[in-house]
Amino acid sequence: MTATHKADLQKKFRYHHGNLREAAITAALEILARDGVAGLSLRALAKATGVTPTAFYESHFGDKDELLAAVAETGFQRLALQMAEDATGAPSTQERIERLAVSYIRFATQNKPLFQLMFGRELSDMKRFPTLAMTAGKSYSLISAALSKRTDGAEDARFLTVAIWSLCHGLTTLVVDEKLKPEQFGVDTTEAFVKKTIGLFGSHLA
Amino acid sequence: MTATHKADLQKKFRYHHGNLREAAITAALEILARDGVAGLSLRALAKATGVTPTAFYESHFGDKDELLAAVAETGFQRLALQMAEDATGAPSTQERIERLAVSYIRFATQNKPLFQLMFGRELSDMKRFPTLAMTAGKSYSLISAALSKRTDGAEDARFLTVAIWSLCHGLTTLVVDEKLKPEQFGVDTTEAFVKKTIGLFGSHLA
DNA sequence: CGGTATATCTGAACGGTGCAAGGATACTAA
DNA sequence: TTAGTATCCTTGCACCGTTCAGATATACCG
């Protein structure tokens, strides 16, 4: 009994706090959603997890950037997951692309600070975290895979992927950062706008 | 002689420092270009202009955001100016749009930190600075004006403007923030990619 | 079971940031 | 010349990320 108890404790409360790393990421996501990316400080995070601001160093994250990278990575995982779910069962390539795009912008508007962290400049150099780039690439691959099914060359697919992603990402960031007001769209919602925009590529998606 | 001398001094060294506001903006642009947006602190700016960090308050800028807004505004002015210059004499609507887009991305890559300041989240709420939004709108108007010359309805023009700007802005930010590597393009340069992308809208720009 | 090693967390402190308050200073206008 | 005012400086605060030395709880081994 003491053995299994110990094992349980090891899982739930490893060492002093127990899974501080996991707890930190969870708390960070909450702080992010509540106070925005500017409110996510190590001191605030420490207070939220009931720990000293220096507790994250050495053992769990050597750096604030490592913490941010971990948080951003879960963000990219969620984004890719949501996009994949939203696009399943699409009858055509065009509709699949539409759904992916709508899912992308929906994620951004519903997880604004997280999206800002994922694509912003808070974490100074992404090169330090190759895993991050890989996870971020999952969403990209969804678009790419949808397009490569077409009969045209792979070259065109790669080109179209970047174009569609750029369009989608540009609109999303402009809306999220409030540089672009929905009134300027000429359509009711951002999602409707995205669909209409994808339509512009018309023949290229047939 | 003392009178004219005094007048000269008044122009060059008004009060203690003289045109601190203008000097601050100029120095800020230099710091920005040299050390990036992260290196632009009030203390660094103070050292560059030979003044105390608190000298900017009350008289010139009540806030760091006001300083950043002023810097960003000159950025938007330069951007609009460059775009207008690069697009003059374009033989067709499509080429005019192409040139505007290329100019946009060229400005971003050649003034990376300034562009990041203009479209980033360093200055917390743009609503405080209505002038900024107006100046930023100049570039937008250039695209809009180019498109409204077409025979189709104004509704379509407004829609196309947002679409093209989004595409252009998305690609630009992804490239500037190094989320997208030029190798992924399938073309040699970013500018070539932009032109090719505009071509996708083909019939809509005829 | 006991003792040592190691992973983990704490506490104090450093240099950095933006910024508020009040005192000093130089220009302006009378 | 003198009064007034715009400008700038000094001091100090709260917050930030981070380092380092030391305390503490867990894990491992005899």
Image: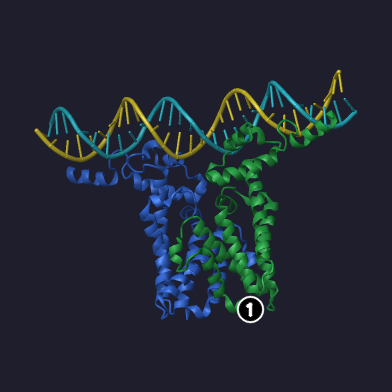
Chain colours: A blue, B green, C cyan, D yellow
Mark 1: which amino acid?
Answer: Ala
Quick one: B34 or C22, which is closer to the camera?
B34
Residue C29 located left or right of residue D10: right
Q: Quadrant of the C terminus of chain B?
A: bottom right
Compared to B117, does B94 lie above or below? Answer: below
Q: Where is residue A109? Give x, y as percent.
A: 52, 60
Q: Quadrant of the N terminus of chain B?
A: top right
Quick one: B101 or A60, which is closer to the camera?
B101
Q: Badge 1 is on which residue? A: B206
Neighbours of disc 1 within 10 Å: few (<14), some (14-19), many (20+): few
Is residue B204 in view? yes
Please identify the residue farthest to the front as the structure is shown: B1
Residue B139 located left or right of residue C11: right
Residue B187 located left or right of residue C28: left
Residue at the spot x=35%, y=55% of the render? A131
Please, what secondary structure does the residue beneath circle 1 have? loop
Residue at the spot x=53%, y=71% of the render? B196
Q: Where is residue B63? Give x, y as percent.
A: 64, 40
